[in-house]
Image (cartoon, rainbow, N blue to C red):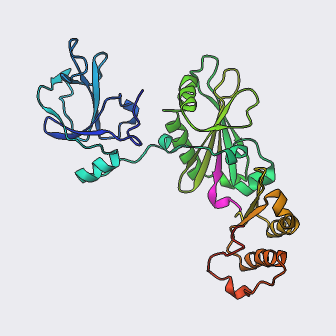
Amino acid sequence: MQINIYKDKMLGARLFGAPVLYSVRPIPREDVPQGWYCYDLRGTARHPDEPHALVDHAEDNHAGSILSYLPLKNGRSQYRLVKDMFQMTGTNPSLAEFCAAEHIRCPETPLRHMLCPASPEEAGLFYAQAPERDEELGAVGHVRVDFGRDGKGFYHTWWPRGPEELNTQEFRDELDKVVNDLRKGVLKDLPSMRRYCYGSDGAIEGGSCCQNYGFTLETERYLYRLRCNPTEGDYQAYLSCFDKQAQKQVIGRVSYASGEHEEFIDPQKYLQTIREELPYQATTGFRCETLTDDPAVRKAVDDMVYDLYGEENPRQIEDYGDIGMTMGGSM
């Protein structure tokens, strides 16, 4: 099993006098930051786990991998004997902690390593939405991916789902960057997708023929939702793209003891739902959470809560300026 150098801690060491990071597990070469160096330590047939030589790739007797921001071997030589020039420092830093200690710039995390497993509540957002819901979410479109019969191809089509003005050159440039980076990991091929999904917490409901998995990736302006369907004979991935600047603001959400929940962008629909459901909260487990800063909406929610208990809201609308919510915030 390989190590993720951007998330997993490694071991601090010194090799040939240089500070390095050491991993017992192999380091994927496609993860090595630009300008950095990655080598393997190779043991002998008699002592395969004891570092004997530094090589570019250890086909056998792999005794660990080395990550360094300094070159440790002449590129023309096949190996460099380690002898007594490898010492552990007793530290266990992450890549970021190592860079801070060495006072060097920490490499940026590749986009593919910024994917986060979807929560169960998000499952519905990874499937097709009604046009009005796409508008609320700021949908631009989605990329549909098929790995082909052998699971090694990459056939893709683009499906627009929003106004053409959202499909800007800026968006297309970032989408190319995102897809190309994901193709080094989860979207490399069908076997890679299976390994990625089966080792994750991203299982979501809704797949018609097999278990589907959902992952989110967020950049400064865009949100990407990747749905994986790691099975043969069907489209294996849908990458939905959303412009966060075009999203409609969610002003509140409601939930019930049954697990049902709903978000609102229309203040009147939100207030009407509270008005209708609040009297039955003891039996339905109804709860509401107001997310907007609009004083009128916040006060209206509190008014209904006070009224439920036969009281009058003592606060005036001017009291709902920039201060935090009280009863109207959540209940």
Say which residue appears at 88% left-offset and 66% top-offset.
Answer: 276
Q: Is residue 77 visible?
A: no
Residue 286 spot, x, y in % from top left = 79, 60
Say which residue appears at 67% left-offset and 76% top-offset.
Answer: 326
Q: Is residue 245 magenta?
A: yes
Q: Return the residue nearer the eye: 331 or 329.
A: 331
Look at the picture and state if 237 lies above or below 294. Answer: above
In this image, 311 relative to 225: left or right? right
Q: Is residue 100 visible?
A: yes
Residue 30 spot, x, y in % from top left = 40, 32
Residue 34 spot, x, y in % from top left = 34, 40
Say which residue appears at 30% left-offset and 22% top-offset.
Answer: 57
Q: Quadrant of residue 269?
A: bottom right
Q: Quadrant of residue 199?
A: top right
* Quadrant where the N terminus is found in the figure: top left
The segment highlighted magenta reads 241-248
Q: Return the residue nearer the eye: 148 or 323.
A: 323
Look at the picture and state if 5 lies above or below 252. Answer: above
Q: Is residue 282 magenta?
A: no
* Quadrant where the C terminus is found in the figure: bottom right
Look at the picture and state if 85 lies above or below 226. Answer: above
Look at the picture and state if 260 lies above or below 327. Answer: above
Say which residue appears at 22% left-offset and 19% top-offset.
Answer: 43
Residue 155 spot, x, y in % from top left = 63, 28
